[in-house]
Amino acid sequence: MTVNSGNSCCQQVIRGVTIQNAQTSPDDVTLTEPEITALWLSLKVAGSAVAIALPLAVWCAWILSRKRFFGKWLVEGLIHLPLVLPPVVVGYLLLLTFGRNGWIGGFLRESFGITIAFTWIAAAIAAGVMGFPLMVRAIRLAFDGVDSGIENAARTLGASRRRVFFTIALPLAMPGVVAGTVLGFARALGEFGATIAFAANIPGETQTLPLAIYTALQTPDGDGIAFRLAVISAAVAFIAVALSEWLNARSRRQLSGRET
Amino acid sequence: MTGLSVTLKKHWPGFTLDAAFDAEGGATVLFGPSGSGKTLIVKAVAGLGRPDNGRIVLGGRVLLDTATALNVPPEQRRVGVVFQEPRLFPHMTVERNLLYGWRLLKPAARPDTQEIITLLGIGHLLHRRPNRLSGGEKQRVAIGRALLAAPELLIMDEPLANLDAARKDGILPYLTRLKSEAKMPVLYVTHARAEAETLADRIVHISGGMITGVEHP
C-alpha cells in the first residue's frame, strides 16, 4: 500500500519540484517537525495495535488449530471479517461500538469518563482489528504444522497442557508467529479506511503516515510533502520486513530441521 | 502391586475393540497384526485416547474408569511411551530432550541420568540436535527420555518398526538389557514374532480387536 502510493507520488513530485515547491524539498534529508510527529504516531499506533493483538491472535490461532467446537465456523468468519469488509465499514462498526453512544463506548464514558473514538487509541484499535486476521492466519498455519504427536509425547513425560504449549508448540511455531507479527504490523502501519472513520484525521493525535499523505495530496502544492512521507512509510515497512527476515532466519536456525 | 489391569471397549463403524488383559511386572508383549487394535490400547493406557467403556488400573491407581467418569490426564499417569516414530523435540538438544520429563520430577524422585545414558549408549550424542541422529540413535534417545521421567509403566509401541534390519539388530541388545534392568513393568507392542520372543515374559495375542490368548514362553 505504502509502496504503491510512493510510486504514484514520484511523478507528481518531479512536477512539484519544477514548480519550485520550496519549503520541503525532497532533497532535504532531515525530517521536519510534522513528519516526525506523523512517523512517531504511526509507530506508536501500529506498535500498540500489534502488542495488544498478538497474544489474542496466538490464542485464537491455537484454538482454531487444535480444537473442534460447536460454532467454530462462526468464530472463523468473525475473525476474518475485517479481511473481506471494506475498511471504512469496519471503522464505522467500531464507531458504532466504541462511539459515545455505542454499547462499549457509552459504558466507558459513563463509568470512567473515558472517550475512545477520535483518539490515538481508536487509531490503534482500528489498526489492530484490521491486522488481526492476517496475524491469526499466519500463526494458525504454523500451529497446524506442529506435529501433535510431539505434544502428546511431552504430555506423557509429565508436562501439563500449558507447559506443552509454552515449551513445545509455541517455540516450534515461532517462525509463523514472527511472520504474523510483521504482517500485522505492516497492515497496521498502512491502515487508512477504518482509521479515518473511527479515529478521524487529527494532526498529532490520529493523523498517521497514510492519513498525513492523504491530507498532503489534498493540499495545493502538497506533492513534495506527500512524497517525503511516502518515502518514510516505505523505509519503515522495509525495516520491518528486514527485521522479520532476520528473526525468521534466527528462529529457523534454532529449530534447524524438524523431524519428518 | 505393580501390575497393569486393562478392560476396554470402543466401537467404530466396521471395527470393535473389546479387550481385557492383566500384566504383572516384567515384559508383556502385546502381539498382533496391524489394525488389530494394539495402538488403540496403547493410547487408552497412556491417556491419549478415550474408550467408550473401560477401566485401567496401574499399581493400584485407577487411571481410567468410565463408570465413574474418571480419566486421569496423561501427564499425571506416570506412563512412559516410546512411539513408533521417535517424536523427539526438534528444537532441543539430545540432552534437553532427555531431561524434559526428568526436570519435572521432585529431586528425590529423579532417576540417575548417567546410569540410563550408559545403558543406552547415548553419552556421545548429548549435544547434538535430533536431526543429526540416525534412526536407531533417535529411538534410543526416545527410550532414555521416557525412562528418565521415572514412569511406573513403560509402553513401547512398535519402537523398531521404522528401522531397517541392521538398525533393529543394533538396538535389540539395548532392549534386552533394559528389560533385565528396568524397575518398572514394560508393555511392548509389536507385530514381529522375533521381537516378541526375544523380549517377552508373557505374550498377549490380539486380533480383530479381541484378546485371543496369553502365552508364557
Image: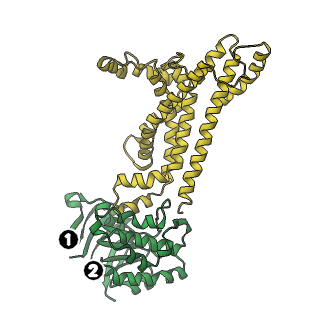
- Tell me what residue is drawn at x 49 percent, y 64 percent: B93
- Tell me what residue is drawn at x 36 percent, y 70 percent: B148
Q: State the residue in front, A165 or A86.
A: A165
Q: Amino acid at mark 2?
A: Gly
| Element class at badge 1 | loop
Q: Is residue B208 visible?
A: no
When the figure is inspected, residue A87 is found, relative to residue A64, above or below; the finding is: above
User: x and y percent of residue B131 in the render?
Assistant: 55, 65
User: x and y percent of residue A197 in the render?
Assistant: 51, 19
Q: State the residue in front, B1 or A245.
A: A245
| Element class at badge 2 | loop
Q: Quadrant of residue B7?
A: bottom left
Q: Is residue B54 visible?
A: yes
Where residue B60 is drawn, which disc sits there? Answer: 1
User: x and y percent of residue A105 in the render?
Assistant: 37, 20
User: x and y percent of residue B1 in the render?
Assistant: 20, 76
> What color is chain B drawn in?
green
When the figure is inspected, residue B75 is found, relative to residue B38, above or below; the finding is: above
Q: Amino acid at mark 1?
A: Gly
Q: State the residue in front, B148 or B83.
A: B148
Q: Chain of mark 2?
A: B
> What color is chain A drawn in?
yellow
- List the residue tagged with mark 2: B25
